[in-house]
Amino acid sequence: MLGGTVRDDEFMADLSRVVNGTAPDDYLDPAAFFAKSYPTRGMKELLKAVCLRLSGKGGEVSSIIRLGTQYGGGKTHALIALVHAARGAKDVTNLSDFVDPAILPVGAVRIAALDGENADPANGLTLEPGLLARSLWGEMAYRLAGRDGYERVRVSDEKHIAPGADTIRELFGGQPTLILLDEISVYLRKVERAFPDASKQFAAFVHDLFKAVASTPRVALVYTLAVGKDDKAGDAYKGENERAAAAMTEAESVAVRSTTPLNPTEEDETPNVLRARLFEHVDLNAAQQVIAAYSQVWNANRDALPADAADPELRDQFARSYPLHPKLLEMLTEKTASLSTFQRTRGMLRLLARTVHHLWRIQPPDAASIHTHHMDPAFEPIRTEINVKLGQGQYAPAVKSDVAAVAGQEPALAQRIDAQKYPGLPPVTAYVACTIFWHTLAYGDPAKGITPEQLKLSVCSPALEPSFIEQARVQFITDSIYLDDRPGAPLRFMAEPNLTMIVRRIMRDIDAADVRTELAERIRALFTLPRGEFNAVLSPAGPYEVPDEVGDGRPMLVVMNHESTAVPSDLREPPPDIAEIFEYKGAERKIRELKNNLVFVAADERAIPNMRDLVRRRLALGLLQKPQEHHITLADY
């Protein structure tokens, strides 16, 4: 991992490849597998129940076990642990952490690991040269009893008609038998396109399979379902998962006393699982020192941080998750995990493994623990995870523009701010932008985003004070193009640029001469209404441009040029230009006689910048209304 040699298959637990001996060593070798595994409560209970059943020492131990969590929740990992245990788990030095070695089955165990991802109902799965299986029961028969077993159910396999319970029982051969069903939803999606009655036949198969297993000693069945507690699924295989769950629930009615539901990895065990897979060793003494340093920062900045910064539970969470920051895990489990494309523990491992490799390579000074902002989208493997694995490519323009550009590209906004404002310091603006970005990746609008207080808690460390982070946040939101600028919205990115920043960027490009011309025209139009109450004199250069006569009887409205004459905030007497026009007339500077015929209009010097900005904004909006004429596109901003 530290050498950058992390492969995708290291995070893709494939049950069938373990059984047939083609999996990567981390999964295939029992010693390596258990060395990098954490003994969760669910895994220990699973191993104990199945080993007791297979060894005949269990009495009333469950013969059928259901593993149910969302995708990536450790189900396949638990099934691989079962395969190794059923085969004796040789040379595993830490086996007693997972299961009592005394209850491991003695002798050979028939194992059928049926993985829906590898099934091929339409073309047939190759069992051996010249022999294909088109159904789960065809493959199961071969795995349990070889070619003779397949021949026993060949007609059922070819016609896709489920075999009966007695036929299935024959395949056990009176020997210890372990049947594993994984990724059932994937199998159903495939088979339902090849056989019209596939769902009905699958239901019939599991009904008779449950019946055969429950009535046969030393036989165990473990199956997985990626659904919630109410048998409702929320992933890409939602329909198939729910149909599988319905079939399993009906089948369980025939073996109700022999069925046990288990969760291989509970929520509170996730940090331990991640730590075991990511690190060979974690110094817990160092953990206490790090947590104490963070606690000091949190206590010293209570007024700037959310209430949970003062909660002792946060420190307890840190102790359990170290070296992972607790707010990182919270984000992954509550935000990223809500995406249907994210496979929980497996997805976390992929992201975090790449993050650890990147941190080891760059060694930032604030990496006393791993924060959300350390998952840097500028690092190409992490960017690929975001765009490809998570399917969040719609945010690629926001990342490129505001968050992090890859090497060789023009720096993103956050990177430019850090280079200009904070040279030689931790890239705090990039940290702010990156944290906001990860909190954007969630399912459903209400879940997206983070508050300023939680942002500071997530980013701050002994190397970064909250006040420093707040300063960077304010600077970043001022210039960000893709941040959601709607009133009341949390800090989060949008897939499209926000209109406020587009207008602001165009305003910056408006020439000052164009602003002056437009403003003069607007003033002229405002004060020279036809036959109004006044005779307007616009921007007089001196007394000689303001007549001293009754004329048509209307008073003179003298509109002073805002660029030369303005009313100061501490006004004690009229501006000199106004006083001169009021006192004198003509080029000879004679005394003005009709002073009461004059009304002066002058700009408040404090309002002049806003007046210019409003005109500049008007011009920018005009350009946006006719983008083709001015060669403006959203991509420019």
Image (cartoon, rainbow, N blue to C red):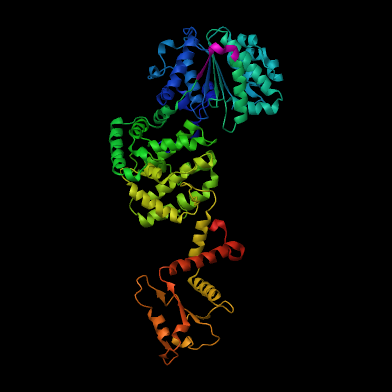
- Residue 185: x and y in percent read 60, 27
Q: Is residue 572 above or below residue 289?
A: below
Residue 38 drawn in magenta:
no
User: Quadrant of residue 284 in the image?
Assistant: top left
Residue at 42% x, 21% y is 41
Residue at 56% x, 13% y is 256
- Residue 84: x and y in percent read 47, 18
Foreground pick, 255 / 45: 255
- Residue 125: x and y in percent read 63, 24
Residue at 44% x, 43% y is 450
Residue 560 can be seen, yes or no: no
Q: Is residue 257 above or below residue 188?
A: above
Chief secondary structure of the magenta portion: helix
Q: Is residue 609 above or below residue 345?
A: below
**Relative side of 208 to 524, left or right:** right
- Magenta stretch? 253-261
Residue 505 can be seen, yes or no: yes
Residue 258 drawn in magenta:
yes
**Relative side of 138 to 580, left or right:** right
User: Quadrant of residue 1 in the image?
Assistant: top left
Foreground pick, 265 / 156: 265
**Relative side of 365 to 385, left or right:** left
Q: Is residue 549 above or below residue 481?
A: below
Foreground pick, 405 / 482: 482
- Residue 612: x and y in percent read 47, 68
Foreground pick, 633 / 585: 585
